[in-house]
Image (cartoon, helix red, strand yellow):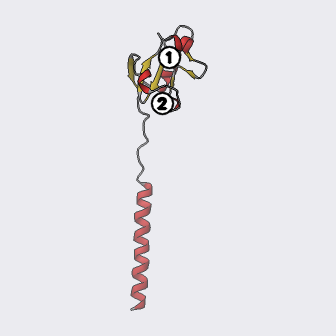
Amino acid sequence: MTREELARNDGREGRKAYVAVGGTVYDVTGSDLWKGGDHQGEHQAGADLTEELKKAPHVRSVVERFPVVGQMEEAAKPEASSGPQWAIIIGAVVALAVLVGIWMAMR
C-alpha cells in the first residue's frame, strides 16, 4: 500500500480507518477507540504511526490485534550516482601523479 492509499483510509465520512505500524497496515475501523478515524484526539487514521507508538501508553501488541490489510510499499530509492565515486578516483589519480612528479623532481 502506498502512503497515498493509506491516507485515503482515514476513517472519515464512512471510509475505512487504517493505520500503519512498522510497515504493516492494520484495519482499526471496528474499534470504538477509533470512531471517525480519530484515536482519543491524539492520532488520526490514514497515517503511519510507527514513531508515535513508541510514546504510546500501550504496547505494540495492542495494535497487532487488529486485522492486517496490507504492507506499506517502500519509497523508491533513487539509484546511486557513480559521479562522486569517479570524482574520488580522479582526485586520487591526480594526487598520485603530483606525488610521483615531486618524487621524480627530487631524484
Where is residue 22? Give x, y as percent: 42, 30
Q: Quadrant of the N terminus?
A: top left
Whether residue 11 is visible here, answered yes or no, is no
Closer to the N terminus: mark 2 or mark 1?
A: 1
Horizontal and vertical percent for residue 45? 53, 19
Specify whether 44 is left or right of 100.
right
Q: Quadrant of the C terminus?
A: bottom left
- Give the residue displayed 59% in from the left and 23% down from the top: 42
> Residue, x 44% and y 34% (percent of image)?
75
Q: Which quadrant would residue 85 be assigned to in this image?
A: bottom left
Q: CA distance from mark 2 to mark 1?
A: 17 Å
Query: Foreground residue, 30 or 2?
Result: 30
* Residue, disc 2: 50
> Can the viewer see residue 49?
yes
Instruction: Name the kind of residue labelled 1 in the image.
Output: Asn
- Label 2 SS: helix
Point 43% across, 73% down: residue: 95
Residue 24, percent from left and from top:
40, 25
Q: Quadrant of residue 94?
A: bottom left
Q: Amino acid at mark 2?
A: Thr
**Residue of label 1:** 9
Q: Which residue does the image show at 44% across and 67% down from the upper left? A: 91
Question: What is the residue that sits farthest to the front in this orientation?
Answer: 57
